[in-house]
């Protein structure tokens, strides 16, 4: 009986390890900092109409930016997996 429980516990731990491997695209901290400026291309539009840009794969939402625009942005807020920026030009 102990061996069965040990195996089940081991299997559970293996599953937890696999779950963490699926989240490799998440950051421990943002690769950008509040106040930094970047020249970016708006790659897409979010559900609320904000432009979406990426810096080193990190997603930034940019109000009043349209898909296809090349703009300068200033980072205004960062979270673990995404951030917000404003148009500079």
Image (tube, rainbow, N blue to C red):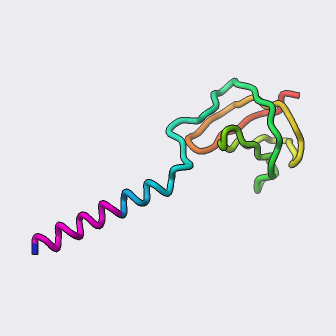
If the image is split into quadrants, where does the N terminus sit? bottom left
Q: Quadrant of residue 34?
A: top right
25 with respect to 76 (left or right): left
Q: Position of residue 84 (x, y in %)?
A: 70, 38
**Magenta stretch?**
2-14
Judge from the rendering whether residue 10 lies leftward or rightward of residue 88; answer left or right.
Answer: left
**Quarter in which the C terminus is drawn:** top right
**Which residue is found at the position 75% from the left and 26% from the top?**
37
Q: In x, y percent, where is residue 82?
A: 63, 43
The residue under the point 30% across, 65% down is 12
Q: Residue sitting at 56 percent across and 49 percent down? A: 25
Query: What x and y, as percent, mark residue 48?
Result: 78, 53
**Front residue (pair 47, 69):** 69
| Principal secondary structure, stretch drawn in magenta | helix
Q: Position of residue 8 (x, y in %)?
A: 23, 70
Q: Quadrant of residue 2?
A: bottom left
The residue at the far left in this view is 1
Residue placed at 69% from the left, 24% from the top? 35
Q: Indicate whether 88 appears above or below 5.
A: above
Whether the magenta-drawn stretch holds residue 58 is answered as no
């Amino acid at each position: 009986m102990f061996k069965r429980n040990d195996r089940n516990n081991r299997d559970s731990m293996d599953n937890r390890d696999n779950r963490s491997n699926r989240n490799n695209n998440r950051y421990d901290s943002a690769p950008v900092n509040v106040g930094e400026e970047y020249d970016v291309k708006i790659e897409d539009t979010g559900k609320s109409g904000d432009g979406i840009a990426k810096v080193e794969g990190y997603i930034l939402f940019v109000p009043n930016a349209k898909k296809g625009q090349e703009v300068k942005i200033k980072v205004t807020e960062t979270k673990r997996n995404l951030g917000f920026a404003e148009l500079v030009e």
